Image: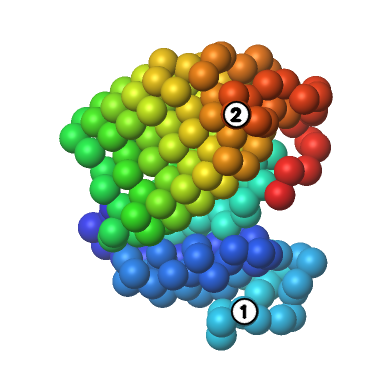
Amino acid sequence: MPKKHKPLIILGAGAGISSILSIAYARNYVVSRLVDPRLAGESKYDVPIKADFQDVDPDEYYFAIGVGDNTRREKIYQETSANYPELVFLPLIHPSAVISQGAKIGEGTIIMPNVVVGAQCDIGQFCMLNTMSSIDHDGVMADFSSLAPGAILAGQVTLGPRSNIAIGAKVKHSVTIGANTVIGANSYVHNDMENNVVAYGTPARVIRARSKDDPYL
């Protein structure tokens, strides 16, 4: 985490923003505003919601993206960074999370309470690890992927870009899950999963194809 705290601007003010705010406050950040054009003029938890941040100097703030949907989070990042390449996106990590020796955490990644990141894991940019999820030793989460609450990845699992492991699902060691894939709640994955599918069950099997823009939350 940065040594000097600047105020924080969070992009997105939808469902789950209370969890993102709780991490920021636990890290002693002052949240200056939420940015969400759909809710501009309102406030959440006493934080004003603005349509943009064009009236501030971006160099005076840190930024985070508080959006749960992987594809939407990626689009917000791409659009924002194209216009403001100088923005600094923080990793936000709750103090109760366990980040093991040698683990790497990418910019913009959000790690919620009681998450465990095992030794030598590589967590990409703008990932989201929800409450009490875990990824064991030598695991990889590609950019914009996510774990729902209670999701568990065993050792040496690879999760592809924009893929999601839903609440309570478990993935066996050394399994690879492709890009844009969703594993349904309480499933058990014991074989590799291809790109662009929805799979669930115990053991999990492919149910249908999906595109990266299909909603899953």
Looking at the picture, how far across and down is residue 119, in whole percent?
24, 31
Q: Is residue 152 visible?
A: yes
Q: Are marks 1 and 2 in contact (CB under 8 Å)?
A: no
Q: Is residue 79 visible?
A: no
The disc, 1 or 2, on the residue closer to the chain's N-terminal end is 1
* Distance in Å between CA atoms under marks 1 and 2: 39 Å
Identify the secondary structure beneath mark 1: strand
Decide: is 31 above or below 152: below
Looking at the picture, how far across and down is residue 36, in whole percent?
70, 65
Amino acid at circle 1? Lys
Looking at the picture, how far across and down is residue 206, in whole percent?
72, 21
Q: Which residue has dot 1 on it?
A: 44
Identify the secondary structure beneath mark 2: loop
Q: Which residue has dot 2 on it?
A: 202
Q: Residues within 10 Å of mark 1 (few under 14, many from 20)?
A: some
Q: Residue furthest front?
A: 202
Between 1 and 114, the residue placed more toward the observer is 114
Decide: is 3 above or below 217: below
Q: Residue at x 26, y 48 (%)?
A: 98
Looking at the picture, how far across and down is residue 46, in whole percent?
56, 85
Q: Residues within 10 Å of mark 2 (few under 14, many from 20)?
A: few
Question: Left or right: where does residue 56 sit relative to residue 124?
Answer: right
Q: Residue at x 68, y 21 (%)?
A: 205
Amino acid at circle 2? Thr
Decide: is 74 above or below 1: above
Question: Left or right: where does residue 163 sit relative to residue 133?
Answer: right
